[in-house]
Amino acid sequence: MSALFVRVGRHAWSAALGAWFLLILGIGAGLLARHLVALPAAEADRAGPAIAAMRTPAEQGRWLAVHVLYAECRCSQRIASHLVSTARPEAWSELVLWTGEAPPDPELQRHGFRVERTTREALALGGIESAPMLLALDPENHVRYAGGYTERKQGPVVEDRMLLERARAGAIPGLPVFGCAVSERLRVAMSSLPSVVP
Amino acid sequence: MKLLEFLVLPPEISEFERRYLQRVNRVALAFFALHVPVFVLVAWANRTGPWLALALTSAVLAGPAIAVHKLANPRTVSVVHGIAAMFFGGLLVHFGQGPLQIEMHFYFFCLLAMCAVFGNPMVILAGAATVALHHLVVWLVLPKSVFNYSAAWWVVAVHAAFVVLESIPACYIARSFFDNVIGLEKIVQARTAALDARNRDMRLLLDNVRQGFLTIGADGSLAKERSAAVDRWLGAPAEGDSWFDYLGRVSQSFADGSRAAWDQVRRDVLPLDVALDLMPHTLKLAGAHLQLDYRPIGASEPYEHYLVVITDVTAELAREQAEIERREAMEVFERILNDRTGTESFFDEGSRIVAGLTKAGEGDLPLVKRLVHTLKGNATLFGLDSVATLCHALEDRMAEEDRTPPPEAYGALLERWARLAGDVARIVGGRGHGIEVDEAGYVTLEKAVRRREAYGALLERVHSLRYEPVTKRFAQFAEQARRIALRLDKGDLSVIIEDNGVRIDPGTSASLWASFIHAVRNAVDHGIESPSARVLAKKAPRGTLVLRANEDEDRIVLEVVDDGKGIDWGAVRERALEQGLPVATKADLEAALFTDGISTAASVTDISGRGIGMGALAHDVRALGGQVTVESSSAGTTVRMTLPREPAPRRESVRPVAAGRGVSIEGAHN
């Protein structure tokens, strides 16, 4: 028995390094997954009517871009910064659906965006479970685009204006949504990934 | 298999590699430790959780920290560094997320390349495998029902391709670093060991050879390696000593001579072999004779190094000396058999000269010179080259120092002479000088007695038995003259003896005969020309030397006549002027000729040239009451010695004394 302890003792540090390797590997994989994983896009048949019901009279018969932003999501914050710092297409009315604890960025309204606060549950009812997400509706409330803003997570180019332009020609496939889970269902699913990130 | 051998290092870890890896591993740990504050800063700037960054970076750092301090194998520690590097890369991508998140991926490739510094392909493979595992585990943890797999997986494939692309050359670099830098140390060690072994073998050889070997530079610098024999003879050199400084520690005069001769070698004025031949070659140390030889090292001139070979020739010289002494002993024995009286007379005169040397004072330089020169000439005449050589060395010393040698300088000569004299004494049996009578002389005397000749006439006959015929001496001088002529390339000299039956008292004439050789040697050396020169001078190619004796009532006249080129009176005048002697008349010049130090020779040889011989001859002739004159022209020279006659010996018939049976009459010499 003592020989076993001696052997164990001799290899204790090697065993500790093995455990370290597995631990860090798992944590790293979890972090990577959260970087690689694309969140589900909106269900167009549910999102379209829900958004159509939110049109103002001034927005009737116009192309409508809807920006779903989550206050506690860094990617959403980045999109919000992008929106207020870029020239907006004139042919489009733009609506910001803001959810989360923190109030909307006042710059959005100052730059002419209509900002509507909503709940995560209401978004989920409309088939929207993640943010930031872009939806483009034609004047007949058909969803021409539902998806993310960048080709890749943290992609340097926010391609909303290009996407809106293309959506006017016809429905286009949505870019992956990189950001945060909004719906409770999705949040529970994300929490199953190994990570120390809340 | 070859790939495996390439990727997996040999199991043995050299001391050099161990030290190197320990150093590099510690540097790597410090490098990774710096990641903690840097990543916290990055996380703070990107609002991605600085506290989380602190926790995770520290967690990753724990691996290398444990490895460096707890693992014995430095290669394993390096592998842990490789793994940790990839973890750090992943953390940077996470905490650096934002617009530059893609750029943060470059750090993976930087770290992978840096891993080459460990000189171990397995470190790079471990890092690459960690990255691969890192991505593979994502497949395992990702709930398939929820997430969109379509996006960005091609990015992972691109990442993998680049990782593989970089890993291959990084492994090559790491292995090359191991082979050529870390491994070079092994190669150097192996070669050093081989060199050391070879040096040991060489050292063993050098320590056990009897000869001394060392090398010197062209500038005289002394190389460190040398055989042990050199140190035994010369001692150890001081640091920085040149070869000549080293020699100076045992003999300053030899070192000075060697240094001066080496300058000739360096100046390249003479052919190298000639210049090296002029180097002093014989060094005497504490009873040992060392011979030094210089040999250039290299294929062609100019030579940068020279080999000095030192050989102890003491035994060889002793053998040679013993052989010389044996030969001379035989020579003495033969001469005693052939001419006992003459040989005894020579040794008597020689002993007188030797005794005179030891008694000479410091102011007797001219006397000492005459004595030594005379002894040398007679020793040569009697075939005693060892004595002649010792006398020549004394003459060189007196010429160089211009003073009488100290008593200890005569040691070798006295010792040699004592041995020779001892040999003679043993052979003659300690008997006193006798009188030799040949058969014819005995018969003549007997007939005279039988005829009952008058008492007075009989007494004269008996009295005359004491005197020796000059022809005996002349025969010896003739033999010497022929030998000298051959040696000086003067051809086959014709020597004519005209004794005219003259007999002379051997006792009183001993000193005369001792000096007579100088006239003979001078005649051959300075008078007789070479055959070719004689032909040009319209003379017979063969030179002639006449040894003549005549007598009348009052005197005996001895002459040495040569048909050579005559005396160069101009040279005599010059030498006389140099010494402040009068040169106004012919008589002055003749007087100068017989003065010590006057010689017309261009150089000194072991035969003549010192200007001593004629002076010694004149001195000894005058001591007997006689006089020396000289007549010279381009047809030849006559040196005439006129001596007062002793109580007249009976004139015998003019015929050569044949070698025949003789009768030795014992008795005291008076």
Image: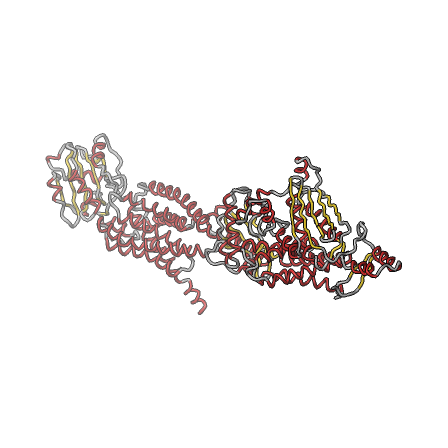
Of residue A99 and residue B229, the one placed in the foreground of this image is B229
Farthest residue, direction bottom: A2
Instruction: Give above or below for B348 relative to B276.
Output: below
Asked which quadrant contains residue A152, the reply is top left
Q: Is residue B462 left or right of residue B422?
A: right
**In the picture provided, is A115 more to the left or to the right than B291?**
left
Query: Looking at the rendering, which quadrant does residue B23 occupy?
Result: bottom left
B506 shown above or below A114 = below
Figure colour scheme: secondary structure
Look at the image and tell me whether residue B334 can be seen. no
Residue A60 vs residue B526, the one in the foreground: B526
Q: Is residue B154 left or right of residue B18?
A: left
- For the C terminus of chain B, the quadrant is bottom right
Name the foreground residue: B39 vs B559: B559
How many numbered markers are drawn? 0
Q: Position of residue B41 (x, y in %)?
A: 24, 51
